[in-house]
Image (cartoon, coloured by chain):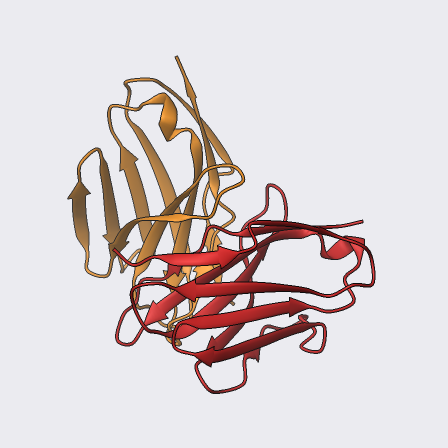
Amino acid sequence: GQNIDQPTEMTATEGAIVQINCTYQTSGFNGLFWYQQHAGEAPTFLSYNVLDGLEEKGRFSSFLSRSKGYSYLLLKELQMKDSASYLCASMDSNYQLIWGAGTKLIIKP
Amino acid sequence: GAVVSQHPSRVICKSGTSVKIECRSLDFQATTMFWYRQFPKKSLMLMATSNEGSKATYEQGVEKDKFLINHASLTLSTLTVTSAHPEDSSFYICSARDLGGNEQFFGPGTRLTVL
Protein backbone atom coordinates (compact mmCIF):
# COMPACT_ATOMS: atom_id res chain seq x y z
CA GLY A 1 0.00 0.00 0.00
CA GLN A 2 0.88 3.65 -0.04
CA ASN A 3 2.27 5.17 3.10
CA ILE A 4 3.90 8.38 4.26
CA ASP A 5 5.53 8.54 7.69
CA GLN A 6 6.65 11.65 9.51
CA PRO A 7 6.93 12.49 13.21
CA THR A 8 3.78 13.79 14.85
CA GLU A 9 5.38 16.64 16.73
CA MET A 10 8.76 18.28 17.21
CA THR A 11 9.99 21.07 19.46
CA ALA A 12 12.88 23.41 18.73
CA THR A 13 14.33 26.67 20.01
CA GLU A 14 14.18 30.01 18.26
CA GLY A 15 17.36 30.57 16.23
CA ALA A 16 18.21 26.87 16.08
CA ILE A 17 18.05 24.32 13.25
CA VAL A 18 15.50 21.53 12.94
CA GLN A 19 15.22 18.61 10.53
CA ILE A 20 11.86 16.99 9.82
CA ASN A 21 12.12 13.54 8.30
CA CYS A 22 9.70 11.80 5.97
CA THR A 23 9.70 8.29 4.56
CA TYR A 24 7.41 7.32 1.75
CA GLN A 25 6.12 4.28 -0.08
CA THR A 26 3.96 5.04 -3.10
CA SER A 27 2.91 3.34 -6.31
CA GLY A 28 5.33 5.06 -8.62
CA PHE A 29 7.02 8.34 -7.84
CA ASN A 30 6.76 11.74 -9.45
CA GLY A 31 8.26 13.91 -6.79
CA LEU A 32 8.18 14.80 -3.12
CA PHE A 33 6.52 17.95 -1.83
CA TRP A 34 6.73 19.81 1.45
CA TYR A 35 3.98 22.17 2.51
CA GLN A 36 3.60 24.44 5.53
CA GLN A 37 0.23 24.77 7.17
CA HIS A 38 -0.61 27.23 9.93
CA ALA A 39 -3.57 26.39 12.13
CA GLY A 40 -6.86 27.15 10.42
CA GLU A 41 -5.23 27.93 7.09
CA ALA A 42 -4.66 26.05 3.86
CA PRO A 43 -1.24 24.56 3.07
CA THR A 44 1.35 26.69 1.32
CA PHE A 45 4.01 25.24 -0.95
CA LEU A 46 7.57 25.06 0.36
CA SER A 47 9.53 22.73 -1.89
CA TYR A 48 9.49 20.07 -4.58
CA ASN A 49 12.21 17.44 -5.10
CA VAL A 50 12.19 14.94 -7.93
CA LEU A 51 15.93 14.24 -8.18
CA ASP A 52 18.24 13.05 -5.41
CA GLY A 53 20.04 15.69 -3.44
CA LEU A 54 19.56 18.90 -1.53
CA GLU A 55 17.52 21.87 -2.73
CA GLU A 56 18.17 25.07 -0.82
CA LYS A 57 15.75 27.95 -0.71
CA GLY A 58 16.62 30.61 1.83
CA ARG A 59 16.26 29.31 5.38
CA PHE A 60 14.55 26.16 4.15
CA SER A 61 16.20 23.20 2.42
CA SER A 62 14.77 19.89 1.29
CA PHE A 63 16.60 16.65 0.63
CA LEU A 64 15.57 13.56 -1.30
CA SER A 65 16.92 10.04 -1.58
CA ARG A 66 14.77 8.05 -3.99
CA SER A 67 16.59 4.77 -3.33
CA LYS A 68 15.81 5.05 0.37
CA GLY A 69 12.30 6.51 -0.03
CA TYR A 70 13.40 9.30 2.28
CA SER A 71 13.21 13.06 2.43
CA TYR A 72 13.83 15.72 5.01
CA LEU A 73 13.01 19.37 5.42
CA LEU A 74 15.68 21.46 7.11
CA LEU A 75 14.73 24.75 8.72
CA LYS A 76 17.53 27.09 9.80
CA GLU A 77 17.54 30.19 12.00
CA LEU A 78 14.15 29.28 13.34
CA GLN A 79 11.69 32.07 13.95
CA MET A 80 8.54 32.00 16.05
CA LYS A 81 6.46 32.34 12.88
CA ASP A 82 7.80 28.96 11.74
CA SER A 83 5.55 27.30 14.31
CA ALA A 84 3.19 25.34 12.07
CA SER A 85 2.50 21.88 10.72
CA TYR A 86 4.76 20.63 7.97
CA LEU A 87 3.21 18.21 5.51
CA CYS A 88 5.17 15.76 3.43
CA ALA A 89 3.45 14.50 0.26
CA SER A 90 4.62 12.07 -2.39
CA MET A 91 3.21 12.22 -5.91
CA ASP A 92 2.42 8.76 -7.22
CA SER A 93 2.33 7.39 -10.75
CA ASN A 94 -1.15 8.87 -11.29
CA TYR A 95 0.15 12.30 -10.28
CA GLN A 96 -1.94 12.11 -7.10
CA LEU A 97 -0.48 13.53 -3.90
CA ILE A 98 -0.28 11.04 -1.04
CA TRP A 99 -0.16 13.02 2.17
CA GLY A 100 1.54 12.40 5.46
CA ALA A 101 -0.29 13.30 8.65
CA GLY A 102 1.95 16.31 9.17
CA THR A 103 4.56 17.24 11.77
CA LYS A 104 3.55 19.92 14.24
CA LEU A 105 6.60 22.08 14.91
CA ILE A 106 6.63 24.02 18.17
CA ILE A 107 9.18 26.82 18.47
CA LYS A 108 10.16 27.95 21.94
CA PRO A 109 11.85 31.26 22.72
CA GLY B 1 2.41 33.24 -8.74
CA ALA B 2 -0.64 31.08 -9.19
CA VAL B 3 -3.60 32.11 -7.07
CA VAL B 4 -6.60 30.03 -6.13
CA SER B 5 -9.57 31.53 -4.37
CA GLN B 6 -12.36 29.86 -2.46
CA HIS B 7 -15.74 31.20 -1.49
CA PRO B 8 -17.14 31.36 1.08
CA SER B 9 -14.32 31.25 3.62
CA ARG B 10 -16.69 30.33 6.40
CA VAL B 11 -20.27 29.07 6.41
CA ILE B 12 -22.67 28.02 9.12
CA CYS B 13 -25.82 26.21 8.08
CA LYS B 14 -28.65 24.18 9.51
CA SER B 15 -28.76 20.42 9.26
CA GLY B 16 -30.48 19.27 6.08
CA THR B 17 -29.55 22.25 3.94
CA SER B 18 -27.15 22.25 1.00
CA VAL B 19 -24.00 24.33 0.80
CA LYS B 20 -22.04 25.25 -2.33
CA ILE B 21 -18.34 26.04 -2.20
CA GLU B 22 -16.61 27.66 -5.16
CA CYS B 23 -12.99 27.25 -6.13
CA ARG B 24 -11.47 29.52 -8.74
CA SER B 25 -8.03 29.68 -10.33
CA LEU B 26 -7.43 33.39 -10.85
CA ASP B 27 -4.41 33.59 -13.12
CA PHE B 28 -4.06 30.19 -14.74
CA GLN B 29 -6.15 27.50 -16.35
CA ALA B 30 -6.75 24.63 -13.98
CA THR B 31 -7.20 21.47 -15.97
CA THR B 32 -7.40 19.46 -12.76
CA MET B 33 -8.87 20.47 -9.43
CA PHE B 34 -8.81 18.56 -6.19
CA TRP B 35 -11.14 18.73 -3.22
CA TYR B 36 -9.83 17.88 0.23
CA ARG B 37 -11.38 17.66 3.65
CA GLN B 38 -9.41 18.15 6.84
CA PHE B 39 -10.61 17.42 10.35
CA PRO B 40 -8.90 19.12 13.30
CA LYS B 41 -5.34 17.95 13.86
CA LYS B 42 -5.64 15.48 10.98
CA SER B 43 -4.00 15.37 7.59
CA LEU B 44 -5.63 16.35 4.34
CA MET B 45 -7.99 13.74 2.99
CA LEU B 46 -8.54 13.77 -0.76
CA MET B 47 -12.23 13.57 -1.55
CA ALA B 48 -12.25 13.78 -5.32
CA THR B 49 -10.34 14.80 -8.40
CA SER B 50 -12.06 16.64 -11.20
CA ASN B 51 -10.92 17.37 -14.72
CA GLU B 52 -12.56 20.14 -16.68
CA GLY B 53 -15.54 18.92 -18.65
CA SER B 54 -15.64 15.42 -17.23
CA LYS B 55 -17.09 13.68 -14.19
CA ALA B 56 -15.17 13.80 -10.96
CA THR B 57 -13.32 10.77 -9.67
CA TYR B 58 -14.22 10.15 -6.06
CA GLU B 59 -12.03 8.50 -3.49
CA GLN B 60 -13.21 5.34 -1.77
CA GLY B 61 -15.72 6.06 0.94
CA VAL B 62 -16.76 9.47 -0.39
CA GLU B 63 -20.42 9.59 -1.44
CA LYS B 64 -20.69 11.16 -4.87
CA ASP B 65 -24.40 11.88 -4.42
CA LYS B 66 -23.71 13.77 -1.24
CA PHE B 67 -20.68 15.71 -2.42
CA LEU B 68 -21.53 17.01 -5.88
CA ILE B 69 -18.60 18.32 -7.85
CA ASN B 70 -18.87 20.37 -11.03
CA HIS B 71 -15.80 21.49 -12.98
CA ALA B 72 -17.56 23.39 -15.71
CA SER B 73 -14.73 25.63 -16.83
CA LEU B 74 -10.95 25.82 -16.69
CA THR B 75 -11.12 28.31 -13.85
CA LEU B 76 -14.03 27.15 -11.72
CA SER B 77 -14.97 24.06 -9.76
CA THR B 78 -17.78 23.80 -7.24
CA LEU B 79 -18.41 21.41 -4.39
CA THR B 80 -21.97 21.12 -3.12
CA VAL B 81 -22.53 19.40 0.19
CA THR B 82 -26.11 18.18 -0.06
CA SER B 83 -28.33 17.61 2.96
CA ALA B 84 -25.51 18.58 5.29
CA HIS B 85 -25.27 17.00 8.74
CA PRO B 86 -23.17 17.97 11.76
CA GLU B 87 -20.62 15.25 10.92
CA ASP B 88 -19.95 17.08 7.64
CA SER B 89 -18.55 19.99 9.62
CA SER B 90 -14.95 20.29 8.51
CA PHE B 91 -12.38 22.40 6.71
CA TYR B 92 -12.78 21.96 2.95
CA ILE B 93 -9.82 22.90 0.78
CA CYS B 94 -9.52 22.92 -2.98
CA SER B 95 -6.37 22.89 -5.02
CA ALA B 96 -5.70 23.35 -8.69
CA ARG B 97 -3.08 22.16 -11.11
CA ASP B 98 -2.45 23.49 -14.58
CA LEU B 99 -1.71 21.48 -17.69
CA GLY B 100 1.76 20.01 -17.57
CA GLY B 101 2.40 21.08 -14.00
CA ASN B 102 2.98 18.95 -10.93
CA GLU B 103 2.51 21.54 -8.23
CA GLN B 104 -0.91 21.97 -6.68
CA PHE B 105 -1.93 25.47 -5.69
CA PHE B 106 -4.25 25.57 -2.72
CA GLY B 107 -7.20 27.77 -2.04
CA PRO B 108 -7.53 29.34 1.41
CA GLY B 109 -10.12 26.79 2.54
CA THR B 110 -13.75 26.91 3.65
CA ARG B 111 -14.74 26.15 7.19
CA LEU B 112 -18.16 24.52 7.25
CA THR B 113 -20.14 24.25 10.46
CA VAL B 114 -23.43 22.37 10.35
CA LEU B 115 -25.69 22.96 13.32
Residue at 57 percent across and 52 percent down: it is: B110
**The chain in orange:** A
Quarter residue A93 falls in = bottom left
Residue A55 in percent (x, y) is at: 17, 47
Residue at 29 percent across and 64 percent down: it is: B27
Closer-to-camera residue (A1/B15) = B15
Please state if B24 lies on the left or on the right of B11 as rendered. Answer: left
Residue at 19 percent across and 60 percent down: it is: A51
The vertical placement of B59 against A4, above or below, is below
Closer-to-camera residue (A102/B16) = B16
Please state if A74 lies on the left or on the right of B30 as rendered. Answer: left
Residue A72 in percent (x, y) is at: 31, 44
Q: Residue furthest bottom?
A: B54
Quarter residue B41 falls in = top right
**The chain in red:** B
The vertical placement of A28 against A14, above or below, is below
Residue B73 in percent (x, y) is at: 43, 79
Please state if A59 lies on the left or on the right of A45 as rendered. Answer: left
